[in-house]
Structures are given as structure tokens and as C-alpha cells.
Image: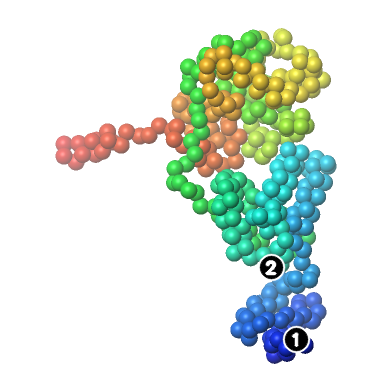
Amino acid sequence: MMATIRKRTLPSGLVRWQVDFTDQAGKRRSKLFPRRKDADVYLVKVRSLVANHTYLADSDSTTVADAAKAWLDHCEVRCKTGRRMERSTLRGYSDYVRLHITASEIGIGDKLIAQLTRRHVNEFRDRMLLNGRSEHLTRRALSVLKLALDHAIDNGQLFTNAAQGVRVIKSSRIEHKAPVPTKEAIRALIEAADEDFKPHLIVSALGGLRASELRGLRWQDVDFDRGFIHIRQRADAYNQMGEPKSRAGFRDIPAGPMVLNALRRWKLRCPKNALDLVFPAPQGGILQHTKTQARFRKLLEKVEVTMRWHDLRHFAVSLWIEQGFSIKEIMTFAGHSSIQMTMERYGHLFPSPDHQKAMAMVEAKLLG
């Protein structure tokens, strides 16, 4: 690469140092700097970029806001063509871009992606935390930014992702522990529920299905003979039926006699529906989760118990752990993508070995 640095005096009388070079496409480029030192640093950097065919001129670059919009447009196409993009996911991505990444007070929407550095992303992260965003929200916003920049790389608009590897350090070393209802509370809910609502509670509390999976469950996915519930689809927040959110979501959950008998009895009363749903709406369509939550809240008030619907899933996992299933089995039944995810949520529920007793046995073997 041919490159030079020369001193220039502008018409205004200001002295500047100009770096002239040829990029990887053979196009001449130049950039002005107030100090010779800055020009020297840039020359070293641009020589490396051109040699690696990763130089991108500022004039050819786009802003973070424009790159994010292009990525969201791509996500919308995926959503409309059924390519693993749900409307609720797209809406969440749009909110993260609008409320955080391109927000005027903390965002970096006006920054050119060709100029974006790790420092800029780190500063964006810190501004989010200083302005009251939670660790989880900040971590999610950084993930969305990374996806948008990855899309720019796919389109040849960028060569490196400045958001790659940027972390949010936890404020505490104590891991989040999933809240697990007591057996007494679950028993009270099931006993107080009407006959039409009991099966919802029993399948959720003993099968560990997510709410969307419960709403998408079909009778053909219930294997009464072998005693399994097969998770093959889910209903999103917009009542659109689709695949589970991840590959791990496709799974077979063992069902005991209580679950199977509850489903057998419910099948006799279940409203007929074209979708073959186990828990359809009264008129036969997809049941809105808000309707289930409303019934659940009334039941909670009746038995004077406080919990969320999702805590039924936590309860199911706690029973599997108590029963002695292996971590791998629990990960599979819960539909987690990794053992790490299982341990982060439920590691505190696994029984601890009796170390004191073990050490006493060691001493006994040594001393007799």
C-alpha cells in the first residue's frame, strides 16, 4: 500500500497533517489530523486494515441506528416468512433498539459503525447502568446490539463486531435462585380449583411445561400408553402456533399416573377444536394466557397463596431433583439448552453431600 504523511496549511491558516493512501479496492483516500503523532498512529492502523482487506471508509459507513433498522427489517421478513422469528421476539428487539440503543440520552445510534470501538460499547453499557437500567436489561441490550452489528457484517458493511465480548459484571456473586412453591401451596391450589382448571395446574406443576407450551399442546402429543408428553409446538403471545423457541425445546417429558388420569378425565369434557388442542379456548381456538392468569389470580386469592404461574414450572423441576434424576435428565425434561442454565436456576436445590460424615470416615480409616 502506498501511503504518505504531509504537512498542509489550510486556507483558514490552520496547520494539519494529511495521511494519503490507497485502500484495498485501489481507491485513493485521505484523512486530516491536527497533530503529526495522531497521523502516525492512524497510518499504522490503516496499513494493517488495508493489508487485511478490512478497511472501511467513514464515507461508506452507516450509523448504528441505520444498521439496527436494516437488521429489524430483515427480522420482519423472517417473521412474515415463518423463519424462526416470532412477532413477540421482533417486538422485543424493536423495543431494545428504540428505548436503549438509539435513545438520545444514553444510546449510540448516531455513531458510524465503521468508527465504533470496544470503548464506545463499554461506555454505552456504563451509561445504561448509571441511568438505572438493570443488569439483565443491559445485558439484553448489548446482545441485541451485537446481533445488529453481525447483520451489518453479513452485508459487507462492517468487518469486526465491537460489541463482541463486552460483559456486564454482576453486582453480586450470589446467583439468582428460582422461587419454588411449597408442596402444601400446590396441593391447596389443586384441591381448590374447579374440575376444568385442575388439569392445567396438574400438568404444569408436575410436567414443567412453559405457558406457551401448555397452550400449544395437542392430544396427539400425549402418549397415554407409554406415559409421555411430547413438546412439539408452542403458542406465542399473538396466538401464533410455531416450533419451540430452541432445539432443546423439542423434548419428551415423562408423565405419572396423576397427570395421565387428570388428562383422561379432562379429554371427556374438553371442547372440540380443529387444532386438537388439549387446553383450547372455550370456543375452540387458542387459549389466551391472560385468561389463564386471571383464573389463577382468583384461585391464589381464594387459598391465600402468592406465586406466579411460571413458579409451577419451578415446582416441577424441584420435584425431579428431589426424586434423584440426574442433571442431564432434568436439563432435558425442562428444555434447557445447557447444564449451566439448569444449575444457575436450580443448583441450590440439589442435595449437598454430608462432608462432615465423609471426613469422619476418612479419619476412622486412618486412626482406626
Measure how far apart labels 1 and 2 are at the Cα level.
Answer: 27 Å
Nearer to me, 255 or 61: 61
Figure check: 58 above or below 120: below
Instruction: State left or right for residue 322 relative to residue 58.
Output: left
Please name the residue shown 62% across and 19% down the image. Answer: 296
Q: How is the image coloured?
A: rainbow
Q: Secondary structure at mark 2?
A: loop
- Asked if residue 58 is positioned above or below residue 279 in the image, the reply reads below
First of labels 1, 2 by sequence position: 1
258 horizontally vs 28: left or right? left
Q: Which mark is residue 115?
A: 2
Q: Look at label 2 and name its amino acid.
A: Gln
Q: Position of residue 224 (x, y in %)?
A: 65, 17
Mark identifier at residue 12: 1
Residue 1 visible to the viewer: no
Task: Identify the secondary structure beneath mark 1.
Answer: loop
Q: Is residue 223 above or below residue 45?
A: above
Amino acid of disc 1? Ser
Can residue 239 be seen in this snapshot? yes
Q: 351 or 61, which lies in front?
A: 61
Residue depicted at 35% across the width and 34% down the height? 353
Name the spot of residue 96 as percent of width and height, x first. 68, 47
Q: Residue 72: give x, y in percent of width and height.
A: 77, 49
**Which residue is found at the position 50% from the left and 49% from the top?**
170
Q: Residues within 10 Å of mark 2 (few under 14, many from 20)?
A: some
The tag on residue 268 is none
Rendered image quadrant of residue 32: bottom right
For the residue pair 365 and 302, the one nearer the viewer reads as: 302
Residue 365 in which image quadrant: top left
